[in-house]
Amino acid sequence: FLDVWFADAQNGYIVGAYNLIFRTADGGNTWTPLFDRTANPKFFNLYAIRSVNGDIYIAGEAGLMLKLDRSDEQFKALTMPYNGSFFGLAGAGNSVLAFGLRGNVYRSDDAGTSWIKVDVGLLSAVVGAARTQRDATLLADAGGRIVASGDGGRTFTNVTLKQPMPLTGIAEAGEGRLALVTL
C-alpha cells in the first residue's frame, strides 16, 4: 500500500501498487476491495488518494488521474496533459494540484476537467505537499527544496531552509512550523 485517506473516523480508502484499492466504513475493521471500480485497465500503481474541495482524486503511474463519480461509485479517468507518474495531490484554494516526477506540477481550476502545467521551480520529483494555517500550499521535492503558494497554486516562491536535506514528505506542524520527512 502507498497511501491512505480518511474522510472521518469511520470512512476511508487505501491505495497501492497494481491498482490496489480498498474502502472501509467501520474505521478500518473491515475493508472492501474496489478493484473493479477504477478506470485502470493496465493496473498502474495508485500512489495517492486525497479529497480536494469535496471531490476524491487518485494520482497514479503513467499520467493516471482518477476522480470518484459519486453517482455510480466509480473512479473515472481524467484526461491529463502529462504521461509521467503523479505521486501526490494537494488543494490550493479552489484548485487541485497534481505533482510528480522531475518537478512536474499541474493545476485544475475546474475540478479536474482541464489541467495546466505550473512552473513551480522544483527540479526533482515532488514528494510532498502541505497546507498551512494561513492557507498557503507548500510543495517539497526530493532534492530538499520547498516552494509556497498563497494564490491558489498559480505562482510559487522559494522557502529557505536552515539546513537543506533530501526530503520524502512535509506536513504543517502548527504555530508556523513544518515537519520535514527525510531518509
Image (tube, helix red, strand yellow):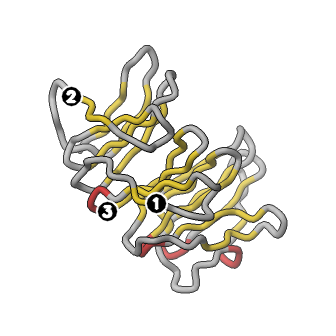
Q: Mark 2 belongs to which amino acid?
A: Leu
Percent across and percent down for residue 95 are 56, 47
Q: Which residue is mark 3?
A: 101
Residue count near mark 3 (Cα–Cα under 10 Å), binned few <14, some 14–19, many ≥20? some
Percent across and percent down for residue 160 are 21, 28
* Residue 183 or residue 160, whichever sits in front: 160
Q: What residue sits 46% from the left and 19% below the top?
A: 174
Q: Mark 3 belongs to which amino acid?
A: Leu
Which image quarter is the C terminus in? top left
Write down the quadrant of residue 149 in the picture: top left
Q: Is residue 66 above or below residue 173?
A: below
Q: Residue furthest right?
A: 71
Q: What residue sits 38% from the left and 41% below the top?
A: 155
Q: CA distance from mark 2 to mark 1?
A: 28 Å
First in sequence: mark 2 vs mark 1: 1
Q: Is residue 169 above or below residue 89?
A: above
Q: Is residue 1 above or below residue 90?
A: below
Write down the quadrant of residue 159 in the picture: top left
* Residue 183 or residue 52, whichever sits in front: 52
Percent across and percent down for residue 6 are 65, 45
First in sequence: mark 1 vs mark 3: 3
Q: Which residue is mark 2?
A: 161
Determine whether the residue tagged by mark 2 lies in a helix, strand or loop: loop
Percent across and percent down for residue 114 are 57, 64
Q: Mark 1 belongs to which amino acid?
A: Ile
Q: Residue furthest bottom?
A: 41
Between circles 1 and 3, the one closer to the viewer is 1
Q: Which residue is mark 1?
A: 116
Determine whether the residue tagged by mark 1 lies in a helix, strand or loop: strand
